[in-house]
Image (tube, grey):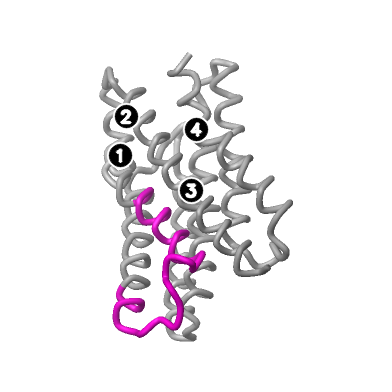
Amino acid sequence: MVTKAINYFDTIPPLLLLILALTTMRRQGRDYIVWYLGGQFFFNGYANWLNELERETNLFAYSLNFSWAYSILSLYFARLYASRKWEWFILSLAALYQLNLIYTLQTSSTVADFNSGSFGAASLLITVACLIYYMQQLAGQPKENILTVRDFWYVNGIFTYYTSNFFIFLTYNSLVSRNYANIGVIWKIHNVVFLIMCVYFFVGMRCKALLEK
């Protein structure tokens, strides 16, 4: 029962956060984290549904999810930095990633491929983006308590997830090709870290709700 529940840690928490955002947050239009959560719920839910049908071709759903996630987070950090130079740099990297993904899908012999190299590279870039945000906060003198700033909690969640899962993404394809016996356990660790990220997002959403009152 516990194992079954862990399998849905990447689907149910995003759904609950989306409900929270839509019912308590006044403006979702430019909240890229809400868009990010929407993609996580859709693609991860689709992958879990395919898994329930006992199909072995659900890896492409995770590839689409990662593509969506990296694009949305690129937009998020471009807005967060509020710098034209950083915006062009981040969005250019995101465009290169998407072009590489399209090329990989066209040359791949199967839709079940998991592009560990691209996933690992994108995770590293997202981690660096989080570190730049931390450096900016340390270099400046914030006018308010950073613990009440929603973006601080959002970045904490993103940093925790992509840093913790970097090596999982980077080695997953190799482990699958070698029929590694404990691959299911590794992905459950991924889902637990995903849940932790959602907890950070929850705290961030509550901070925003308090500030809007």
Q: Do the residues labelled 1 and 4 touch (CB within 8 Å)?
A: no
Q: Is residue 42 above or below residue 30?
A: above
Neighbor class of circle 3 (other Cα within 10 Å; few <14, some 14-19, many 20+) is some
**Which residue lies at the image location 43% right of the left edge and 80% below the top edge?**
86
**Dot 3 amino acid type:** Phe
Residue 60 percent across, percent down from the top left: 51, 37
Query: Where in the figure is residue 85, as x and y percent of width and height?
Result: 44, 85
First-in-chain label (2 vs 1): 1
Q: Name the residue under label 2.
A: 186
What amino acid is at disc 2? Ile
Residue 78 vs 37, above or below: the answer is below
Read off the magenta span: 135-162
What's the distance in space between the residues labelled 2 and 1, CA to CA?
Answer: 7 Å
Q: According to the image, label 1 marks what residue?
A: 168
Of residue 73 and residue 4, the one placed in the foreground of this image is: 4
Q: Which of marks 1 and 4 is nearer the N terminus?
A: 4
Q: What's the residue at 33%, 60% (across, down)? A: 127
Q: What element carries label 1?
A: helix
Lateral position of residue 159 relative to residue 42, left or right: left
Tag 1 near tag 3, CB within 8 Å:
no
Q: Look at 49% across and 68% down and name the residue there.
A: 149
Asked if labels 1 and 2 touch by Cβ distance under 8 angstroms, the answer is: yes
Nearest to N terminus: mark 1 or mark 3: 3
Gap in Å between the C-alphas at discs 3 and 4? 17 Å
Query: Is residue 83 found inside the magenta-colored segment of the image?
Result: no
